[in-house]
Amino acid sequence: MADQPDCAATRSDDQPYSKDELVGIIIEKLDKSTEEETLEFHDVDVSTAWQTIDELERREEGRAHRTTYDSLQKILKLVIAPCLIHQVHFPWFSDQIKLYSSLTSKEKSDLRILPSPRFENFQAPYTASRKEPDQCILPAGKSLPTVVIESGWSETKPQLYRDRDLWLRGGVGNIQVVIILKWNADSGGKVKGVIEAYDLDNVGNIRCISCEAIFPCPPTEVAATQNISLTKDQLFGPNLSLARNDASTIDLNVDGLREIAAEYIGQQGYTPM
């Protein structure tokens, strides 16, 4: 599957779309969509973006999509009808945290693993942003998640990286790690996948802390050792006494993700690369 082109929110006269025009375009796409698609509208001011999102909530009647408004870039993005491959991480992430980790029962109960709640309380320069992750950990007592997953099938890597920047820079002090999964299919229907993890270093620069191939699968001896490692501090955040100064590691096994991904990829009519 090729990355989808952007849908820019400007008309032939270079005037921004109004709220009603944006809602009309998006509702039409939602009505006609038969597979996942990413829409991206540029130069959308805060008022128009928020009114559009609120109107869609009133009118869409549960039709599936993920919404992002990046107030720094003035970009409104919607991923319509996320497909199975897009959502491979759901069972894997929950199982790795809840079933296979060394966390205590109390620690597990304090980590709420949520599919796609909306968050709005970001810091400058993303103050007016609104964002729905593909999945996240929201510990008890926190208003922003600590760990976020963003998955891309119809989205491009630059789009995913913009999301990463919004989370880490707009959620500084709260959001500890952003995990990105990117899936691509070639013309023969073979799917390639990679998983990456990012955080902020001590001076606030975004850095990659993990990068692992999902497909093509590496040699067996390599695949068996692939993990995305998170500390308890990263899972719970720096301000909760439960995890304060706890650098013990929780390893998320990539081979387990690969197994689920192969199943979902087959159900979509593709094959792993």
Image (cartoon, grey):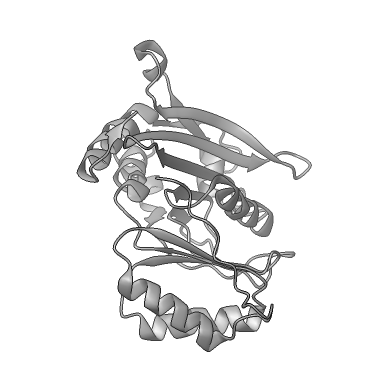
Residue at image x 55%, y 50%?
160
> Seen from this angle, which residue lies furthest right?
203
Q: Nearer the viewer, residue 273 or 237?
A: 273
Q: Nearer the viewer, residue 59 or 9?
A: 9
Is residue 33 visible in the rendered image? The answer is yes
> Seen from this angle, which residue lies furthest front?
12
Q: Position of residue 100 (x, y in %)?
A: 31, 34
Is 233 situated left or right of 84 in this image? right
Residue at image x 27%, y 33%?
271
Residue 163 vertical position relative to residue 207 in the rendered view, above or below: below
Q: Quadrant of the N terminus?
A: top left
Residue at image x 39%, y 66%?
65
Q: Position of residue 221 (x, y in %)?
A: 38, 11
Q: Nearer the viewer, residue 257 or 272?
A: 272
> Seen from this angle, which residue lies furthest bottom?
20
Q: Position of residue 43 (x, y in %)?
A: 67, 72
Q: Quadrant of residue 8 in the image?
A: bottom right
